[in-house]
Amino acid sequence: MAEEFNHELLCVLSGFGGQGLLFAGKVLANTGLIDGRHVSWMPSYGPEMRGGTANCSVSLSDDAIGSPFITRPTALIAMNQPSVEKFAASVQTGGTIVIDTTLAMDGAAGVELTDGVKVIAFKATEMAEEAGLKGLANIICLGRLWAETHFCTREVLDAALVKCVPAKKQHLLDPNRKALQMGIDLGE
Amino acid sequence: MADTQERVLMKGNEVLAEAAMRAGCRFFFGYPITPQTELAAYMAKKLPLIGGTFLQAESEIAAINMVYGAAAAGARVMTSSSSPGVSLKGEGVSYMAGADCPGVIVNVERGGPGLGGIQPSQSDYFQATRALGHGDFYMPVLAPSTVQEMADLIYLAFDLADEYRTPAMILADGMIGQMMEPVTLPPERDLSTLPAKPWATSGTHMERKHNVVNSLYLSPEKLEKTNFERFERYAEIKEKHQRQELMLCDDAEIVVVAFGAASRIARTAVRDARAKGIKCGLLRPITLWPYPEKAINQLLDNGAKQFLSVELNMGQMVDDVRLAVNGRADVSFYGRTGGVLPTPEEVLEQIEKIAQNMERGE
Amino acid sequence: MAAPKTPVTLPDYQVERIGSQIAEGETIKSARPHVLTDVVTNFCPGCTHGIVNRLVAEVIDELGIEGKTVGIAPVGCSVMMYDFFNCDMIEAAHGRAPAVATGVKRVHPENVVFAYQGDGDLASIGTAETVHAATRGEKITVIFINNAIYGMTGGQMAPTSLPNQVTQTSPYGRDVSKVGYPVRISELLATLDGVAYVERVTCDSRAHIIQAKKAIKKAFQNQIDGVGYSLVEVVATCPTNWGMTPQNAFQWLRENMLPYYPLGVYKDVVADGFANAAEAALERAKDCPIAQQGKEA
């Protein structure tokens, strides 16, 4: 499966504002930057950013990227129920959906999925809090997605994370790394 | 600031700001509006650090008139807004054109008319290419389709503005403005090579006759003469600065014409059409004024038979395609409006329809 | 009027400039300021714009700032001012002179930048630009001509037209119950923290003209000294559109304009003991902690 995704990852990351999905998307986008691939990161913007569902679309590709708005994702990270309802059905055959069931308690139940889509559901927010990694469920989910799809090497994934943690918030790098590894471990 | 050669991941709006500063822009006057606000915020943060001035004006009207004043005083200066705000700038842009003042205006378009929406749109094509304000004038209009082009084209816009003493516009949209892509930023512009501005109003210092920056000519003959002179410059711009990208056009019978955000969608559709064996190519205008008429004529000479204009509006650029084609081929249009984006599949469907009609000899 | 017995004292360069034109035995009553070009203005006979243009020019001469002065002409009767002045000039769109002046001043803080505007330009279509340039404390000088009418377009109601004043667009008199009251700009701007100096003057008599010149000079000097935004409102006449002789127009001004627009200083931070508008603003907001941040720095 990893091979299949290698030339193109079209990932939607979606949840409530404040869950860190735009940040997780930036980490994902930076893996493409480091790898010298074509990359686009497209956020939702405007009033919906404030209170409603926040999402971003990240495309990694070996070819020039057409529309940065992803209509047929190959991967989805959904951290609340509205996100599952909005995007799960659009995921392509062979695609992967990671759902944080702490808030999206129903998982993908009630959504008509395309055949051959793999759903990975677990309580990421709860896990993060139990592990003392409050607010890093986004990175756990990203780690889990990587374990499933290997959109880059493990080294590049780490380098991207390092790149995205701002200089002023270096104390957050270790917790982020732990969260990433925790997500990866879930898949192995 | 990021290094020159390094590839960085940045938002389109921020790249416009960063590249403008590298082009030597030290003055920014603007007013908040979605989806261009990141540009102003970036300027507010960075300009003071390099000795520049960021000023949030009380309105778009005030902002463009501050641009006019700063341009008259000889500075590299810009403003940015989104569709409804750009309408307000029309007045100042016309005065700048009439007084031959260089400056850069950015429009990160959203849907209209009226307050419209905030999603990406190209519905200000007419407004931009017919030059935005009252009176007999045009201005160069550059349409980026990638974040990299945001950098490259605003850099170019400042040079065109100074070289031809004209306002110049970047016509982008919410998609290119909001998205992040890798970009290699341009180097700091060597300002010593800029054209001199002996006409600028910065004080006579009692060493020269006084300069007047003005667009008022009560004598019709004088006004006509200045307009004639300005249109000579326009003719030169038309001759030298038509820009476009051609993709898969060598043997194309069907040419999809699209710029900015729409061209990204069209690119995917054209590739898909080729995969289905349709002789289809993409013409992506980079300059919307001057319109790339020469490229269209070349395509016609090469055997293009059908032109399909794909836009995020109800059909505006298609008029310029028709003018350039001048009856030598069929011209059709497909677009979505209000901030709705067509999918590549929708565009492909249009291409296939045209291909089928051609086969049937219609 | 009898000719003055002694020549007016002139700056050297003026004597140099006009000296050759003086025949022996003649005395100079009045010389054209250097910064005024040698052209015939477009102002109507009896118009007070000519007086105020001249006062501005004399002040520029006396302060020796012609070489670094940039003037902004408005839309209105003084639209052609860029032809009348020898300093660099910019013609602005209607009402936008303060924004244009802001642009120039931000690029060249060392320049002296002035805007010259009428009541329609400054107090109607350009109110936002006026209020905001003032509240930003732009270090510019604004000369505001208030003659209670739109002159150039032929006598329409202005934002400053008096209650019951008959104009082309208030043919039954300005009905304040329908179109509201005149804008009193000096009073309005005096409330703004960015403003250093506002004075209302007039030009109906020699004494008032001398006072007007003092005010204009102060407004320019404030800019040179970095004191802050300064505006001089000149209550003026429009004999043509008021439909009066110049002398009757002055009489009407004294009877109707001055009671509505009282002359005087409305704000002067220097006279109040402050170095500039910023200091005065800090003092006014002394009970607001956030406004005091950075005070010591």
Image (cartoon, helix red, strand yellow):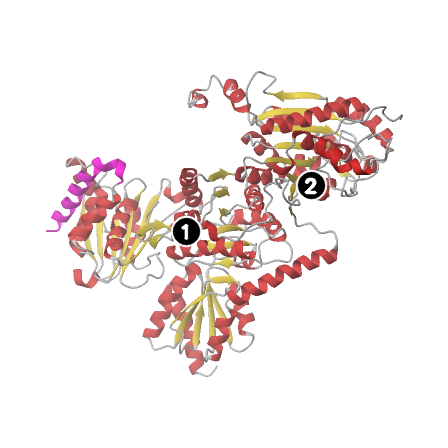
Dominant SS of magenta comes to helix
- Report the residue at 70% width, 32% height from top: C56
Residue under numbered circle 2: C86
Foreground residue among B211 and B36: B211
Residue B309 shown left or right of residue B268 in the figure: right
Q: What is the quadrant of residue C262 in the picture?
A: top right
Question: Residue most toward the right?
Answer: C2
Foreground residue among B106 and A4: B106
Residue B358 shown left or right of residue A151 in the figure: right
- Report the residue at 64% width, 58% height from top: B136
Subunit of label 2: C
Residue A120 visible to an observer of this rendering: no
What is the C-alpha distance between the residues marked 1 and 2?
A: 45 Å
User: Residue B284 placed where, x, y %?
Assistant: 44, 66
Residue A123 shown left or right of residue B357 in the figure: left
Q: Is residue A171 above or below residue B231?
A: above
Q: Is residue B302 above or below residue C64?
A: below
Say whether mark 2 and mark 1 are on the same chain.
Answer: no
Stretch in magenta: A166-188
User: Residue B133 placed where, x, y %?
Assistant: 60, 53
Residue B242 shown left or right of residue A159 in the figure: right
Where disc 1 sits, the SS reads: helix
Residue under numbered circle 1: B177
Where disc 2 sits, the SS reads: loop
Subunit of label 1: B
Foreground residue among C151 and B161: B161
